[in-house]
Image (cartoon, coloured by chain):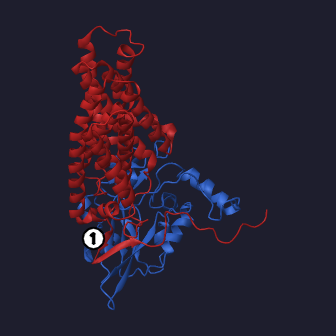
């Protein structure tokens, strides 16, 4: 069985937000919900300041904090190691939003329009709302699932396909010869907040 | 939102959850007060405490249910107690409410067994007090189990919530007791116990904030309470209303309207305490290669309306 993971090369990422948008297009997430997003960091003092972008998503941890706190076992790791949510079992208690150290989870009460209040949903928004409710749903916890629907079609996750700098590599971490495994090994991939003991499957390569 | 906590603070658990945590504490505290009074033979105080306990928790549970996103799945929570503190807490709270209800029906109203069978009443009362204790501590353990939020995951939080719950429970009993004309001596005695609890609560609160301030990852949260956006509610709501005024009034031994005012302010203080602890809950930023990463923009706030609506 595969154990899917991702490598993000910070040397290549220039913070263009293409992944953030591609994720929205692929998953029809409502306003203010970003399964894949970009954080910005600064280091140094003026005038020697460097900025760095950090693309984050659900890290599909081996030992996920969200799974530990879920009172109904609605969220679990499936056989591919991808952490998913069963929307028919989730109570929407939002405890997993507190249990995830990376802020990867979102929940919304309803699919609101992107446009000012009072306007009816546009045709595209209607389509997105229906697609969202079918796949994830309102009131329940939602998050990145490594684009399950795209993987079924044999495609890479949307953020990986969209990255113009090829900063993202998606692959099977169990296969020692996959590009992802090789890059983690060769370029000393690291994970975020290792002290939380969650053991994420999304690795980063140092920016410099 | 405080600039330092922006994008890191939890925004999902707010007033409804604060009311739930508060009422679970008040209910448990009132029940324990009632049971202790029963052992002392103060029947009127005992009746008030037991009658007040489980309905408070029940109202709190309604608030919790109101906060759920998918209420139709709520029944599933009790089925897997090995998973999470929400599951365990739901079971403890349910048992507490059932015991409190049975106690009320048998010995208070309609009270078919009133005046008889002291041992059975004491036994059920003690059993209820045990689960009341569980209810009060659980509110702290619930937040404490959210390990990514360092402001919550400390041992002092359950202790703080427990002491605050006992204190507000006594205040609720005093509040109702004054209205129902309970013997003044006994209310003053309850007030004297409350002095001790308020002093302990103040010390635990100081230790909790000091500890949070000393740990780099939760310093922002402590600052949010002490001098950030929640400072007004913390100093006025928790400090003055919840601790100082009830302490002074209890120490002066006021009764009647004064006791009612002090109790109401103390209860407001208890609610404010739950709210500021929830509001201060924040993750610490991710860092890598010497950078500290924070979200930019305002991803969890409503988008501003651009221009005016077209005429329809």
Chain seen in red: B
Q: Is residue B204 left or right of residue A148?
A: left
In terms of depth relative to the viewer, which is nearer, B122 or B46? B46
- Dot 1: chain letter: A
* Residue A100, image quadrant: bottom left
Relative vertical location of residue A131 with respect to residue B58 in this rendering, above or below? below
* Residue B284, image quadrant: bottom left
Q: Is residue B200 left or right of residue B63?
A: left
In terms of depth relative to the viewer, which is nearer, A78 or B59? B59
* Residue A83 position in % (x across, y down): 39, 54
* Residue A87 position in % (x across, y down): 49, 46
Relative vertical location of residue B105 with respect to residue A169 in this rendering, above or below? above
Extreme-bottom residue of the structure: A47
Callout 1 crowding tier (Cα within 10 Å): few <14, some 14–19, many ≥20 = many
Relative vertical location of residue B63 with respect to residue A14 in this rendering, above or below? above
Disc 1 target residue = A190
Relative vertical location of residue A196 with respect to residue B106 in this rendering, above or below? below
* Residue A7, image quadrant: bottom left
* Residue B173 position in % (x across, y down): 34, 31
In terms of depth relative to the viewer, which is nearer, A6 or A22? A22
Which residue lies at the image location 50% right of the left edge and 75% below the top edge? A18
Q: Is residue B175 visible?
A: yes
Which residue lies at the image location 22% right of the left edge and 21% below the top edge? B40
Q: Is residue A81 left or right of residue B306?
A: left
Q: What is the drawing colour of chain A?
A: blue
In terms of depth relative to the viewer, which is nearer, A68 or B58? B58
């Amino acid at each position: 069985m595969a154990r899917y993971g991702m490598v993000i090369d910070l040397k290549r990422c220039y913070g263009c937000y293409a992944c953030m948008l591609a994720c929205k297009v692929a998953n029809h997430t409502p306003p203010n919900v970003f399964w894949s997003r970009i954080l910005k960091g600064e280091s140094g003092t003026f005038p020697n300041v460097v900025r760095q972008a950090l693309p984050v998503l659900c890290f599909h941890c081996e030992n996920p904090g969200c799974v530990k706190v879920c009172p109904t076992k609605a969220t679990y790791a499936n056989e591919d190691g991808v952490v998913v949510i069963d929307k028919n079992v989730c109570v929407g208690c939002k405890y997993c939003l507190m249990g995830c150290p990376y802020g990867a989870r979102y929940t919304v009460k309803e699919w609101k329009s992107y446009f000012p209040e009072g306007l009816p949903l546009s045709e595209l928004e209607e389509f997105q709302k229906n697609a969202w409710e079918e796949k994830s749903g309102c009131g329940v916890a939602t998050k990145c699932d490594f684009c399950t629907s795209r993987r079924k079609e044999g495609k890479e996750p949307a953020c990986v396909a969209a990255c113009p700098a090829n900063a993202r590599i998606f692959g099977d971490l169990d296969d020692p010869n996959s590009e992802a495994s090789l890059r983690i090994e060769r370029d000393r991939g690291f994970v975020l907040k290792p002290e939380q003991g969650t053991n994420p499957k999304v690795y980063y390569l140092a920016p410099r | 939102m405080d600039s330092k906590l922006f994008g890191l603070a939890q925004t999902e658990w707010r007033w409804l959850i604060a009311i739930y945590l508060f009422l679970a504490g008040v209910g448990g505290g009132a029940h324990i007060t009632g049971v202790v009074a029963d052992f002392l033979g103060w029947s009127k105080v005992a009746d008030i405490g037991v009658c007040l306990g489980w309905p408070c928790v029940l109202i709190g549970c309604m608030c919790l249910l109101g906060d759920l996103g998918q209420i139709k799945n709520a029944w599933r929570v009790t089925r897997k107690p090995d998973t999470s503190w929400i599951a365990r807490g739901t079971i403890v709270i349910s048992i507490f409410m059932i015991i409190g209800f049975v106690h009320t029906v048998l010995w208070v109203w309609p009270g078919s067994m009133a005046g008889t069978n002291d041992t059975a009443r004491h036994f059920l009362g003690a059993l209820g007090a045990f689960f009341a204790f569980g209810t009060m501590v659980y509110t702290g353990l619930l937040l404490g189990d959210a390990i990514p939020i360092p402001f919550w995951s400390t041992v002092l939080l359950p202790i703080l919530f427990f002491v605050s719950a006992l204190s507000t429970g006594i205040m609720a009993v005093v509040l109702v007791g004054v209205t129902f004309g309970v013997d003044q001596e006994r209310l003053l005695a309850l007030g004297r116990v409350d002095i001790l609890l308020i002093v302990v609560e103040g010390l635990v609160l100081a230790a909790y904030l000091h500890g949070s301030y000393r740990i780099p990852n939760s310093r922002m949260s402590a600052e949010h309470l002490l001098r950030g956006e929640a400072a007004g509610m913390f100093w006025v709501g928790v400090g003055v209303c919840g601790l100082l005024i009830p302490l002074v009034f209890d120490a002066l031994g006021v009764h009647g309207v004064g006791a009612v005012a002090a109790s109401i302010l103390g209860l407001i203080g208890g609610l404010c305490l739950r709210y500021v602890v929830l509001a201060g809950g924040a993750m610490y930023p991710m860092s890598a290669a010497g950078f500290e990463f924070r979200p930019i923009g305002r991803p969890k706030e409503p988008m501003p309306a651009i221009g005016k609506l077209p005429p329809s």
